[in-house]
Each structure stands twice: as structure tokens, then as C-alpha cells.
Amino acid sequence: NAGVMQNPRHLVRRRGQEARLRCSPMKGHSHVYWYRQLPEEGLKFMVYLQKENIIDESGMPKERFSAEFPKEGPSILRIQQVVRGDSAAYFCASSPPREQGADDTQYFGPGTRLTVL
Amino acid sequence: RKEVEQDPGPFNVPEGATVAFNCTYSNSASQSFFWYRQDCRKEPKLLMSVYSSGNEDGRFTAQLNRASQYISLLIRDSKLSDSATYLCVVKRNMLTFGGGTRLMVKP
């Protein structure tokens, strides 16, 4: 059973370009979470999605950032018109459906390291 | 004030030492508590959940005090491979991470 997959692992963009980060959850997991870790800081929650639904986006910056988790395919975190301050590690986590008594542990992917030049 | 506070360290200890990490959280509505481990430039990995009754996993013991909103992690007989950053995590709806405590175990 493959773990959470993220790609690319490293992404370099120039200021003003778009960044697309992809996350494939573990098999059987229907919940996806995105976190950002700035250099020398802790992880900060960004957004929580289920298939075709954004459940909680309270941690997302108001502009330039969007996320989706389509019916088919990976979850995508999209950053438009990137700026240097967007340089960070972006981690995706997934968890299984929230049935009564089920394990809701979040399992993390290896992250995408975004560098904005 | 941060929702989850940890001493950033670093804690430099010799192999075999016992080391304790502490963490406080501000939101009394927090429901679940965890310690994660993060190696340099890697993803966080769940070390253990934390319960009020205290729980132990090998050399690792975690404790939760809900009244004081305080969480601890004790590592006995430190190994070189324990060197990492230890993240205190609380969950209400989402996971909220502390800034981490860095541990360096020296030969």
C-alpha cells in the first residue's frame, strides 16, 4: 500500500509564475489536508478537502492560493503569481473516511519544496 | 500567543541520556494530542498519541494533563537515531503544530 505521494518533490519558479503541487492520498483515504512549513517554522494548516468539496480553508491566504480535490485524480494546490515569500515546504496529508471509531490519523507525504527566485 | 508552545531547543544530550520535552496548548477544546517526529527536510511522522492516563511505547513515554493544558514526552536511553525535531500536535478539527523541539544526541 503506497503512502501519500506528492509531486514534484522540488519546484523552482520565478516571481509571477504559477505553481501547481499535486497530492495523491493513500489508497482508501478520502480526506486530504495541505500544510505549509516556512523555513525554520512549524507546519501551518492551509486547507482540508474531501472529494469535490472544500471542507475548511481557514488557513489559506485570501489571494492567489486555491485547492481542489476532483472526483478523479490527485488533489492540486495552485499558487498563482508566486512571490519569494511563498518559498516553503508544502506537505499533504490524508486520512480515511470518518466512520465511527475509525482511525483518523493523518499520514503525511514527503512534501514539495517550492523555491521562488 | 501561539496555540501550541514548545521550547525550540536544541537539546544536546549524550547517548543513553534521558530527555524530557514539554508543550503547552491554549485551546481547552482540543480533543486529541500527538507527538510527531520530523527529520531534517523530511515529512512529519506520527510518534505516538497522548492520553490522559499516560502511555508508553518502548523508550518513549507521553503524558497529558488536561487541567494544566500540558503535554510531555520522555525519551529514555537516547540513541543517535533519536536526533530529530519533535513536534507537539493538538487536534480540534485540524492538526495544530507546535514549532518543534530539536534534539541532538551525541556519541
Image (cartoon, helix red, strand yellow):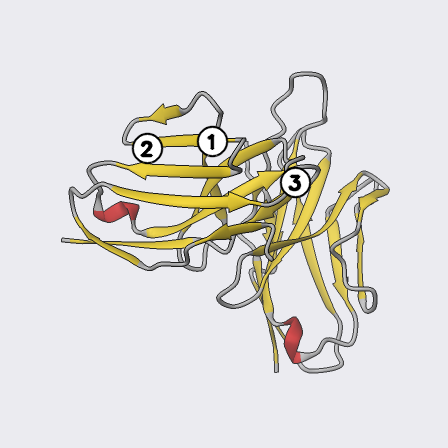
| Residue located beneath label 3 in the image | A25
Mark 2 and 1 residues: CB-CB less than 8 Å, in contact?
no
Mark 1 and 3 residues: CB-CB less than 8 Å, in contact?
no
**Pointer 1 indicates a residue of which chain?**
B
Q: CA distance from mark 1 to mark 3?
A: 30 Å
Report whether mark 2 lies on the same chain as mark 3: no
Disc 3 crowd, CA 10 A, few/some/many (<14, 14-19, 20+): many
Between residue A60 and residue B56, name the one nearer to us: B56
**Pointer 3 indicates a residue of which chain?**
A
* Residue A60 appears anywhere in the view: yes
The residue located at (81%, 69%) in the rendering is A64
**Pointer 2 indicates a residue of which chain?**
B
Mark 2 and 3 residues: CB-CB less than 8 Å, in contact?
no
Q: Is B79 placed above or below A80 here?
A: above
Q: Quadrant of the N terminus of chain B?
A: bottom right
The residue located at (60%, 60%) in the rendering is A8
Q: Secondary structure at mark 3?
A: loop
Between residue B94 and residue A102, name the one nearer to us: B94
Q: Position of residue A86 (x, y in %)?
A: 66, 71
Q: Position of residue B26 (x, y in %)?
A: 60, 45
Q: Secondary structure at mark 1?
A: strand
| Residue located beneath label 2 in the image | B60
Mark nearer the viewer, 2 or 1: 1
Residue B64 has which mark? 1
Q: In this image, B106 relative to B56: left or right?
A: left
* Residue B49 appears anywhere in the view: no
The residue located at (60%, 24%) in the rendering is A103
Q: Looking at the picture, which amino acid does disc 3 mark? A: Pro
Q: Looking at the picture, which amino acid does disc 2 mark? A: Phe
